[in-house]
Amino acid sequence: MVNEIEGILDEYKKKPSHLPNVSIIVHQIKVFEPIPGTCYMLTVLSVRNTGAPSIVDNWMMTFDDYPEQKVQKINFTEDIVFPVPNQVPFVYHRSDQLPDKVAENPVPPGGKRVGFILWKLPGFDPKPIFDNAGISLHVTVRAKDVVGNLIVSENKTGKRDDKSLHYPGLQTPASKPDLVSGQPHQDPLAE
């Protein structure tokens, strides 16, 4: 741990203070199939900046475990609800979309933003993932800082024991008991 911190400090000292020094960490990955044949991935991420203030935009993702898989970033204008049969559904608040949090309001020096990005995986069959519940998924998320530097994420999804759908810095997923049922659900993101 001490060596890791010293390494980070050494890297920080090498960067000119007038430039951003942004990093992205992937904390959690969840795959959902709200209706058969429609698959989404929710990534919980944080953006840190130890340099000059910077916005972060031009988000892209590669599903490292399935490199040929097409991925589409989803932007939405309302909260999304992922119904869970016979359980309280999870609600993700629009205000927690990470691209929105860091595109217009620069991340200040020493600042951190936490949020999520929702990705659609067209044609993806999640059965192998669902059949191996303990499997650790790997993705690479890329974005650009205010001066156009490419930022490549670090994946720390295996570092937490807590695999809940809540992460510090996000609004707690709210419950909507009227949506709880054992019936098939409509795709919450259908266009």
Image (cartoon, grey):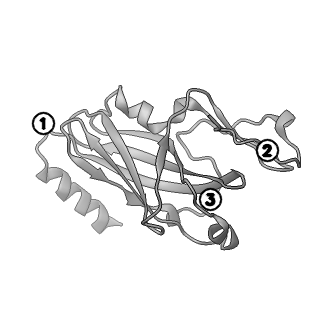
Q: Which structural element holds mark 2?
A: loop
Where residue 79 sits: x, y (%)?
63, 31
Query: Does label 1 or label 2 sit earlier along the sequence?
Result: 1
Where residue 75 sits: x, y (%)?
50, 35
Residue 162 lies in what quarter of the image? bottom right
Judged left or right of residue 67, residue 190 is: right
Q: Which residue is mark 3?
A: 162
Query: What's the amino acid at mark 1?
Result: His
Q: Which structural element holds mark 3?
A: loop
- Closer to the camera, 114 or 81? 81
- Residue at the spot x=61%, y=56% of the render? 31
Q: Which structural element holds mark 1?
A: loop
Query: What's the amino acid at mark 3?
Result: Asp
Judged left or right of residue 138, residue 60 is: left
Residue 185's tag is 2
Where residue 30 sits: x, y (%)?
60, 55
Cα gap from disc 2 to disc 3, whole angstroms: 27 Å
Q: Which residue is mark 1?
A: 18
Judged left or right of residue 18, residue 146 is: right
Q: Residues within 10 Å of mark 2 (few under 14, many from 20)?
A: some
Looking at the rendered structure, the number of numbered marks drawn on it comes to 3
Q: Residues within 10 Å of mark 3 (few under 14, many from 20)?
A: few
- Residue at the spot x=55%, y=53% of the render? 122
Query: Does label 1 or label 3 sit earlier along the sequence?
Result: 1
- Closer to the camera, 176 or 190? 190
Query: What's the amino acid at mark 2?
Result: His
Cα gap from disc 1 to disc 2, whole angstroms: 50 Å
Q: Residues within 10 Å of mark 1 (few under 14, many from 20)?
A: few
- Closer to the camera, 89 or 186? 186
